[in-house]
Image (cartoon, grey):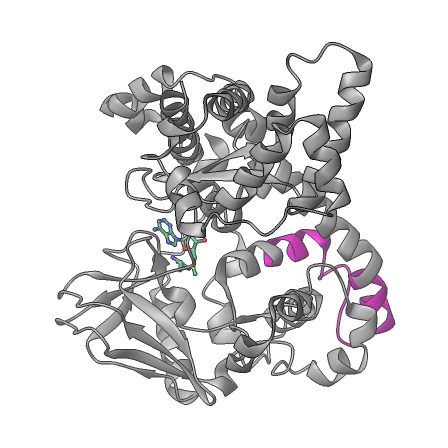
């Protein structure tokens, strides 16, 4: 496919890599002699390999905080801080993105050897860079086309309403003909795939849950060297945040020649593709999931409702349910069962109540203290527990799964399974087709398993 062939590789950038490593020395970034950065023998372009056996708990590299690139270290930090109120947005990413627009196009940037590792950020191949037609054809039903549409609309609004007016106010530092929407979008993808977020302070443990929810997450930041590491769910290293420096530490023994893998979090393949542009082969991804959208549960529950008055009564309780669910509500299933079991449990109880029970529920403003414990609910909605659920609940889940499967272009597993087993056909797939297949197949397998467990 043309777009694949055109995709530039970062490999061969040994000069850029040498410049970066010299810069690392200058800024006091300390690399353990047992590891090295390479473009050969890694799963994707740059990555880190073990030169010798490494034991669990060894520090692989240390990055002083002064080497991090974020809104407080960039050359334009004073201005960003002075004008922070005008840079507020729902993503909270605008200050870092303005810093990156500036630093990535300034010949004098302190981070030039670091940012030059990815010329023009053109190698990124997130679905946001695919055509809409390609996203719909390859990813229908996975949730990614909708997530990308939301991203693109937010990016455009953020650029038009916040970034552009700000740049026009500061022509000495930014120029809309250099700092275009296209570059901004590429940097959003770079931040999605390469940035880190500092965990909230330890003191936060003492805050109650409500307080925690109110706290905005820490803004993203760029962490040179840590972002050279690739991800697998079965990772062998982890980034630790200290007061003066950040350290990458091995979390198990790593053999000579093995790749050092960080974790980007517990990521399903659809999240990896959406945010990072890659997938793990579906069998290897222990964190893979499939969603049952709330709308499918609604359709399943209202299937047999015929009269308008009955539907109105039902809609009332569905409204209560929608408010109980998080935004974009969906029930998430992993390879071993439901991961949002308390939401699903509440939903099933609410939907299968009699009208009298529902009136009582509303009068009490919720349920009376429950005696069921979390472990019991977790067990009931695991793959082992699902076949023993109440028949009416199983039927509801079964129908919701069937409807969810209907949202994929092809709900059957068979065609994807045949493709997965056909080595010759697999070789003929473009990288986009291959990654999309890993997402679709992984999700459909989870959903088909659920059909079996609830029949
Ligand atoms: N390999 C990256 C590079 O050359 O710049 C360094 C890691 S960077 C933090 C994240 C990007 O690496 C992702 O967006 C993806 O393109 C790639 N990546 C990370 N883990 C991967 C994996 N297991 N398989 C394929 N690509 C991966």
Residue shown at 49%/40% (left/top)? Answer: 332
Q: Position of residue 247 (x, y in %)?
A: 37, 79
Q: Nearer the viewer, residue 109 or 97?
A: 97
Find residue 213 and report its image quarter: bottom right
Q: Nearer the viewer, residue 424 or 144?
A: 144
Q: Nearer the viewer, residue 98 or 110?
A: 98
Res. 447 visible in picture: yes
Give the vertical position of 146 relative to 397 (above or below): below
* Residue 188 in magenta stretch: no
Q: Is residue 289 left or right of residue 137?
A: left
Res. 318 visible in picture: no
Q: How many marks?
A: 0
Q: Nearer the viewer, residue 71 or 110?
A: 71
Residue shown at 63%/74% (left/top)? Answer: 106
Give the vertical position of 313 relative to 149 (above or below): above
Q: Position of residue 196 (x, y in %)?
A: 50, 67
Give the vertical position of 175 relative to 203 (above or below): above
Residue shown at 78%/63% (left/top)? Answer: 163
Quadrant position of the C terminus in the picture: top left
Quadrant position of the N terminus in the picture: top left
Ligand 1: quadrant of the figure: bottom left
Q: Which residues are magenta?
A: 163-187
Q: Is residue 358 left or right of residue 239?
A: right
Give the vertical position of 76 relative to 342 (above or below): below
Q: Position of residue 155 (x, y in %)?
A: 71, 51
Q: Position of residue 419 (x, y in %)?
A: 32, 21
């Amino acid at each position: 496919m043309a777009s694949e062939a055109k995709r530039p590789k970062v490999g061969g950038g040994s000069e850029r890599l040498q410049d970066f490593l010299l810069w690392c020395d200058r800024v006091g970034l300390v690399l353990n002699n047992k590891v090295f950065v390479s473009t050969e023998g890694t799963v994707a372009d740059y990555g880190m390999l073990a030169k010798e056996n490494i034991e669990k708990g060894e520090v692989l590299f240390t990055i002083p905080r002064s080497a991090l690139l974020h809104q407080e270290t960039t050359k334009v930090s004073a201005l960003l801080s002075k004008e922070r109120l005008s840079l507020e947005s729902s993503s909270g990413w605008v200050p870092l993105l303005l810093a990156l627009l500036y630093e990535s196009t300034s010949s004098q940037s302190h981070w030039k050897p670091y940012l030059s590792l990815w010329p023009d950020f053109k190698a990124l191949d997130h679905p946001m860079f695919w055509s809409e037609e390609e996203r719909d054809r390859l990813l229908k039903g996975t949730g990614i086309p909708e997530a990308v549409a939301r991203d693109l609309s937010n990016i455009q609004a953020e650029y038009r309403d916040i970034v552009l007016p700000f740049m026009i106010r500061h022509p000495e530092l930014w120029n809309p003909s250099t700092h275009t929407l296209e570059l901004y979008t590429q940097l959003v993808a770079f931040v999605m795939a390469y940035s880190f977020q500092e965990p909230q302070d330890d003191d936060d443990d003492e805050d109650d849950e409500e307080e925690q929810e109110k706290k905005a997450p820490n803004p993203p930041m760029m962490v040179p060297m840590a972002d050279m590491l690739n991800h697998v769910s079965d990772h062998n290293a982890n980034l630790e945040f200290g007061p003066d420096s950040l350290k990458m530490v091995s979390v198990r023994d790593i053999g000579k020649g093995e790749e050092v893998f960080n974790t980007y979090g517990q990521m399903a393949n659809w999240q990896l593709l959406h945010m990072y542009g890659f997938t793990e082969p579906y069998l290897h991804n222990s964190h893979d999931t499939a969603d049952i959208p709330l709308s499918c549960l609604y359709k399943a529950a209202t299937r047999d409702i015929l009269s308008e008055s009955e539907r109105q009564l039902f809609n009332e309780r569905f409204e209560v349910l929608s408010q109980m669910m998080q935004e974009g509500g969906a029930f998430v299933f992993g390879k071993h069962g439901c991961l949002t079991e308390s939401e699903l449990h509440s939903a099933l109880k609410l939907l299968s109540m009699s009208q009298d029970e529902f009136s009582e529920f509303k009068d009490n403003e919720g349920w009376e203290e429950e005696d069921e414990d979390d472990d019991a609910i977790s067990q009931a909605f695991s793959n082992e527990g699902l076949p023993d659920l109440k028949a009416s609940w199983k039927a509801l889940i079964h129908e919701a799964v069937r409807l969810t499967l209907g949202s994929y272009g092809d709900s059957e597993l068979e065609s994807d399974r045949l493709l997965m087993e056909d080595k010759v056909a697999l070789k003929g797939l473009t990288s986009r087709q291959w990654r999309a297949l890993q997402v679709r197949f992984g999700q459909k397998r989870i959903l088909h398993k659920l059909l079996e467990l609830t029949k």
